[in-house]
């Protein structure tokens, strides 16, 4: 009777498949550019809102209203950025989540356990830190969800500044963690920040989503069909009382992200490739431009560390995120069969956990929703998000710099292509043709070394034939 096989622990984020690795690299490249634009937009907003000669113009532009009032869409510029343009960002997030569920690490429940638990702990612990800090200080608990989000674009921009030698396993860990984090942030917005529902508008949005799904199932193509329908769904979702960005997520999740045999790209991958530049290059930076413009002074910065609500946000982002993600990862590997890649050390996970404390985009959005109607507290919370994200950036930069030499060595190993096939050797280790090519290369090298050794030996023999030997005239007494 054959001996039953012992299940081997599932290594989360080990060596990625070549297509998965290329996807991660492409995503990082685009998100990194978007993160840099996001940083520029945030700095621009702070300058625009704090230079005395420009302050009035910033407020005027942000509060300028336009849109069809008859449809309930006469919104300010800042409102259009938060509810309209940011829906594009969440549409891309929905596609990323769908792809992870059908083709990425989340398709395997054993592998999915690690990023899901890490992300959940990375949201629960900051919420608890905020609740505890604000509660004992007598502050409002309304902002408990502000420090729960991670801004992946900003985090990747920080990685781009630090260096590009990160191993793909660590980059994949950060990306997947952020996708799961986005999902739960979306759920938080939908469940906890929904105002009074307009069931007629909500029913219309549901009908629109059903039509969107049916058209996709029928294989109907053409942006001129889907873009107008998407705008109708968005408008109905906005008027229903549910945050309009949920419409973007729902449509993203409906796209097919697995490939058929005759396809180079699935429809979801193709649409994401088209829309991602619009999201990271326009939608998110414009949202930052009209959300990060808070008045910052010495007194205001001091209040960030003395007001219970704002201190709770800072500690939630810096301490809560780090402890939550690191602790969640350790608990998962300790009590399940999941394990980290051999390329990663716990110091790497600690650095990424600190990096996840950059909560810029979604944290600003949740801050606006949590303190809607209280402009003073809303601005204070925005300032605390900026401060917390900055502190998290500094801490993560120090930790990642410490690990940088190790990252560089791992990257060199991942990129090595000794057989010059155009594919890194690490992805060909199970290919007999690769080993035949390497055998030929080693045989050629061995033949070359034998030739060199033979020529040296013949040279020494020729030298020995010289009468008296070389230099013999100097061997006698002086």
Image (spheres, rainbow, N blue to C red):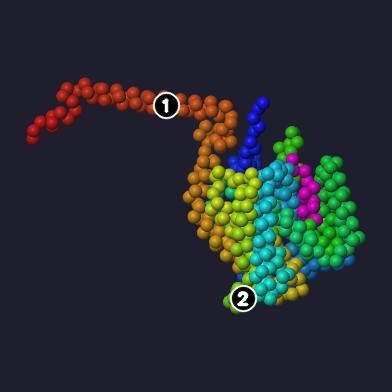
Q: Residue at x 79, y 60 (%)?
A: 190
Which image quarter holds the C terminus? top left
Q: Residue at x 86, y 62 (%)?
A: 240
Residue 42 showing in the rendered view: no
Q: Nearer the viewer, residue 361 or 139?
A: 139
Part of the protein shown in magenta: 247-258
Q: Nearer the viewer, residue 468 or 358?
A: 358
Disc with the residue nearer the chain's start (2 vs 1): 2
Residue 251 colored in magenta in the image: yes
Q: State the image coordinates of residue 135 (x, y, percent, origin top left).
A: 68, 72
Residue that label 1 marks: 446
Q: Secondary structure at mark 2?
A: loop
Q: Secondary structure at mark 1?
A: helix
Looking at the image, residue 187 lies above or below residue 48: above
Q: Main secondary structure of the magenta part?
A: helix
Outermost residue toward the front in this view:
1
Q: Nearer the viewer, residue 115 or 22?
A: 115
Q: Nearer the viewer, residue 413 or 8?
A: 8
Label 1 Cα crowd, 10 Å radius (few <14 / some 14-19 / many 20+)? few
Q: State the image coordinates of residue 275 (x, y, percent, origin top left).
A: 72, 51
Q: State the image coordinates of residue 60 (x, y, percent, origin top left).
A: 73, 73
Q: Residue at x 89, y 56 (%)?
A: 204
Which image quarter holds the N terminus? top right
Residue 342 showing in the rendered view: yes
Looking at the image, residue 328 lies above or below residue 9: below
Identify the image quadrant of residue 187: bottom right
**Residue 306, disc:** 2
Would residue 431 appear left or right of 193 to someone viewing this image? left
Outermost residue toward the left in this view:
478
Residue 120 colored in magenta in the image: no
């Amino acid at each position: 009777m054959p001996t039953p096989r012992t299940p081997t622990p599932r290594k989360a984020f080990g060596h990625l498949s070549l297509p998965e690795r290329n996807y991660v690299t492409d995503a990082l490249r685009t998100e990194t550019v978007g993160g840099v634009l996001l940083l520029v937009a945030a700095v621009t907003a702070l300058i625009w809102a704090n230079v005395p000669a420009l302050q009035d113009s910033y407020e005027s532009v942000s509060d300028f209203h336009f849109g069809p009032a008859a449809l309930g869409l006469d919104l300010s510029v800042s409102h259009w950025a938060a509810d309209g343009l940011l829906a594009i960002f969440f549409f891309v997030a929905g596609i990323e989540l769908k792809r992870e569920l059908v083709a990425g690490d989340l398709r395997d429940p054993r592998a999915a356990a690690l990023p899901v638990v890490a992300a959940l702990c990375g949201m629960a612990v900051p919420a608890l830190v905020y609740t505890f800090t604000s509660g004992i200080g007598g502050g409002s608990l309304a902002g408990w969800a502000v420090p729960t989000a991670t801004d992946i674009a900003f985090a990747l921009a920080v990685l781009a500044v630090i260096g590009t030698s990160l191993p793909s396993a660590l980059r994949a860990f950060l990306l997947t963690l952020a996708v799961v984090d986005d999902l739960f942030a979306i759920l938080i917005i939908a469940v906890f920040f929904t105002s009074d529902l307009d069931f007629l508008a909500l029913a219309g949005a549901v009908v629109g989503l059903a039509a969107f799904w049916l058209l996709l199932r029928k294989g109907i193509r053409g942006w001129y069909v889907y873009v107008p329908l998407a705008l109708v769904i968005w408008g109905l979702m906005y008027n229903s009382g549910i945050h309009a960005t949920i419409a973007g997520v729902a449509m993203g999740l409906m796209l097919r992200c697995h490939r058929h045999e005759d396809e180079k790209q699935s429809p979801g991958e193709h649409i994401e490739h088209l829309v991602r530049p619009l999201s990271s290059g326009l939608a998110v930076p414009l949202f930052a431009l009209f959300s990060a413009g808070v008045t910052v002074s010495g007194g205001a910065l001091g209040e960030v560390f003395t007001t219970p609500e704002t201190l709770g946000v800072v500690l939630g982002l810096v301490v809560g995120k780090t402890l939550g993600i690191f602790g969640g990862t350790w608990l998962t590997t300790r009590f399940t069969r999941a394990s980290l890649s051999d390329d990663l050390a716990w110091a790497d996970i600690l650095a990424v956990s600190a990096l996840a404390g950059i909560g810029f985009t979604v944290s600003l959005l949740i801050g606006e929703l949590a303190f809607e109607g209280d402009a003073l507290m809303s601005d204070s919370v925005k300032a605390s998000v900026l401060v917390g994200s900055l502190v998290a950036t500094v801490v993560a930069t120090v930790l990642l710099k410490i690990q940088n030499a190790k990252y560089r060595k791992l990257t060199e190993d991942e990129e090595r292509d000794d057989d010059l096939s155009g594919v890194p050797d690490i992805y060909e280790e199970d290919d007999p043709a690769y080993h035949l090519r390497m055998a030929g290369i080693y045989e050629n090298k061995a033949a070359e070394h034998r030739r060199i050794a033979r020529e040296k030996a013949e040279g020494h023999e020729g030298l020995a034939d010289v009468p008296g030997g070389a230099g013999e005239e100097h061997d006698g007494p002086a």
